[in-house]
Amino acid sequence: MIPGKKIKTAYFCSQCGAQHPRWQGQCKECGAWNSLIEERVPDKRKAGMKGSSAETRTIAQIEGEILTGWRSGVVEFDRVIGGSLLPGQTVLLGGDPGIGKSTLMLQAAEAYSRQKLPVLYVTGEESMSQIKLRSNRLKVMGENVTVVTITTLEEIVDLVRATDYAVVLIDSIQTIVSSQFDSPPGTVAQIRECANTLIGEAKSKGFALFLVGHVTKEGLVAGPKVLEHMVDTVVYFEGDSSHLYRMLRAVKNRFGSVAEIGLFEMGSDGLSEVTNPSAFFLSGHSDQPRSGSVVSAIVEGNRPLLVEVQALVARGSYGNPQRVAGGIDNKKLALLLAILERRCDYPMSQHDVFVSVAGGLRVTEPALDLAVLTAITSSLVNRTVDHRLLAIGEVGLSGEVRGVTHIDRRVAEAVRLGFETILIPAANESQVQEKSARIVAISNLQLALDIALG
Ligand code: TYD
Ligand code: MG
């Protein structure tokens, strides 16, 4: 700090990066609470106006230089990042602390290394010996993987300029600091500056860059959201750390589809691909009819996925009845119960209701509604539902069953896994040609319950 010189500061949101002149409890841009941090305002570079020397071309004139990318060979991973990794492509990998980002990055490094691509793995979080321990556990040979434990931006830049790496992984961007700024690591100014510089190096040298960013709920470390607009591809690694499955989901992709997900299972020797997700999520599904258990078909990204909804309804003993939802939104559950009470006359307000999606998956898709309501009613009246029955449909406020997207894919997946009776919304009936299962078109909830519960 220079004595006597007033340092200009402002408040930056650690969630979205927006700048505010004054402190306030809530960020006006993204609505996050308690997310503003006071930081020094970066000096603007003085840029004079010069005549433009930029080269211009029409799209037709651009030489058809088709970039061929690199594949890691891990199908679930490659698909999400856009098929193949392009030289200069920048990927942000976000996720909660402890979800498995470093594990994924190390395994990706190994996969690229096996394709004979030189990889640089920069870690600011772990020591060399910790990396070695983890590598042993993951059976990572790392023949072409160079590991460094540095946290200064300038050192990283020197390193990537000196050697021709194809893939550079930074774990995590929140630990890297530029000596140009005196703000601590993880602040909005630092992670923006570091990401910006590294992205520039990636574009000019033509290496692919992965930036790992921890999701932060609030407070002093800025989250990956701040960087989303700067990179080509944004993927989030999700899951519940008490369950085995992990889902890699693309939320932005300049070079491919964002509707892609990749599924992995976390085991004692790292992540392995889940190639048959429906079988994975139904692994605990009973092969006998049971009350309170109904399977449905949802679509995650572009893929159909069968999930089992379980419900337990018990007579409430005192006070407010309990409603506990795992894997679906609590408010959604309250809404569905109100529909059941008002449209089908079941006395839900006197009962405690517990609902969960088996396997720990979080589902926001409305196509699950019918299965949730069937499972709840089945438990309430204590009647079993055929374990070879599957229910698909959104349920509206007046108890009508509404159409869903991708019905053909859902039905095909259900048939593939051996389901024999499939309840579908009447609105989707004309889109289904399946002959090898009994397809029942349903227009309202009561009808579905009559069929499912006999
Ligand atoms: P990690 O990749 O360090 O998470 P992140 O970088 O996102 O913070 O993974 C952390 C968790 O993964 C840790 O709790 C242990 C678990 N894990 C396994 O279950 N099996 C393994 O082989 C490895 C390496 C980690
Ligand atoms: Mg980590």
Image (spheres, helix red, strand yellow):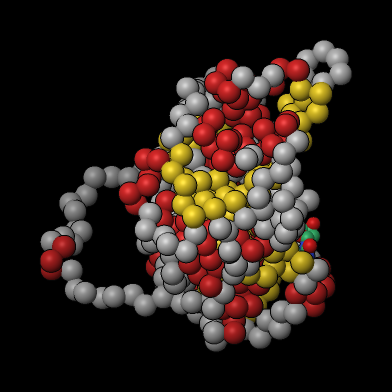
Q: Quadrant of residue 76?
A: bottom right
Q: Is residue 185 among the parts visible in the rendering?
A: no
Which image quarter holds the N terminus? top right
Q: Quadrant of residue 269?
A: bottom right
Q: Residue at x 61, y 19 (%)?
A: 345
Q: Is residue 415 among the parts visible in the rendering?
A: yes
Q: How many marks?
A: 0
Q: Residue furthest right?
A: 317
Which image quarter holds the C terminus? top right
Q: Residue at x 37, y 40 (%)?
A: 427
Q: Residue at x 67, y 70 (%)?
A: 272
Q: From what the image shows, is residue 135 above or below residue 451?
A: below
**Does 424 sit left or right of 98 as displayed?**
left
Q: From what the image shows, is residue 11 above or below residue 51?
A: above
The percent coordinates of residue 449 (x first, y second) are 58, 35
Of 341 and 12, the residue lying toward us: 341
**Does 262 sit left or right of 184 as displayed?**
left
Of 336 and 267, the residue lying toward us: 336
Q: From what the image shows, is residue 122 above or below residue 93?
A: below
Q: From what the image shows, is residue 294 above or below residue 75?
A: above
Q: Residue furthest front?
A: 454
The percent coordinates of residue 97 (x first, y second) are 72, 50
Q: Residue at x 26, y 76 (%)?
A: 65
